[in-house]
Image (tube, rainbow, N blue to C red):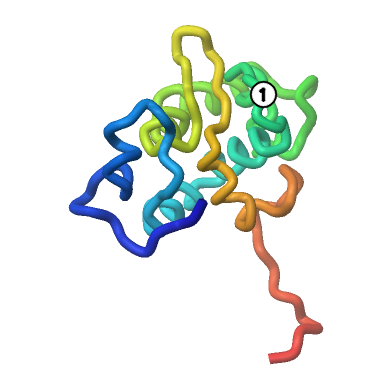
Amino acid sequence: MNVNESTVSGARYEDEAARSGDDPPRTIAKDTAFHLLQNGRRRAVLRMLIACGGDDVSMREVAEHVAAWENDTTVPRLTSMERQRVYIALYQSHLPKLDDHGVIEYDRDRGTLRPTPLITVFEPYLDRGLDVPNVLRSDSNAEP
């Protein structure tokens, strides 16, 4: 599996065979991959799904973990507003986008999602867990 350098006329998937068959795509355009990684909530979803090892995960569980990470707290300490804010954004925007690009299989009716083989493309960019801070700092000891 690899990230391709370009897209084909804005197509959802680079590979024509991936678009026409029932199998999930095995490639994704590089620009599309980086666009999907652009949002912290989507990165958190991808990290969690990779950590779950391919099993189905409930959307509620994902939303709770993302909300806890985002609010720097634990799931039991989340407020209903913190949960709801993340749940709605995942439901309306982020999960459908990941599903549209073949990275996950998202079943809105059942409220479940699972990674497709394409998720492995993102692993090198998500090598740290959900504890990754929202702010990046330079290493003051690093050599130029």
Across and down, in percent, residue 62 comes to 63, 25
Residue at (53%, 25%) from the top-left corner?
Answer: 85
- Residue underneath mark 1: 55
Residue at (37%, 26%) from the top-left corner?
Answer: 22
Quadrant housing the C terminus: bottom right
Neighbour class for label 1 at 10 Å: few (<14), some, many (≥20)?
few
Where residue 139 sits, quadrant-wise, is bottom right
Residue at (50%, 47%) from the top-left corner?
Answer: 39
Across and down, in percent, residue 96 comes to 40, 28
Residue 44 appears left or right of 9: right
Residue 93 appears left or right of 140: left
In this view, the residue in front, 96 or 12, is 12
Q: Is residue 11 above or below residue 138?
A: above
Residue at (68%, 20%) from the top-left corner?
Answer: 79
Q: Amino acid at mark 1?
A: Asp
> How many numbered marks have been drawn onto this rendered protein structure?
1
Q: Is residue 94 above or below residue 33?
A: above
Hey, which residue is sitting farthest left in the picture? 9
Across and down, in percent, residue 6 comes to 31, 61
Hey, which residue is sitting farthest top in the picture? 109
Q: Which SS class for mark 1?
A: loop
Hey, which residue is sitting farthest bottom in the picture? 144
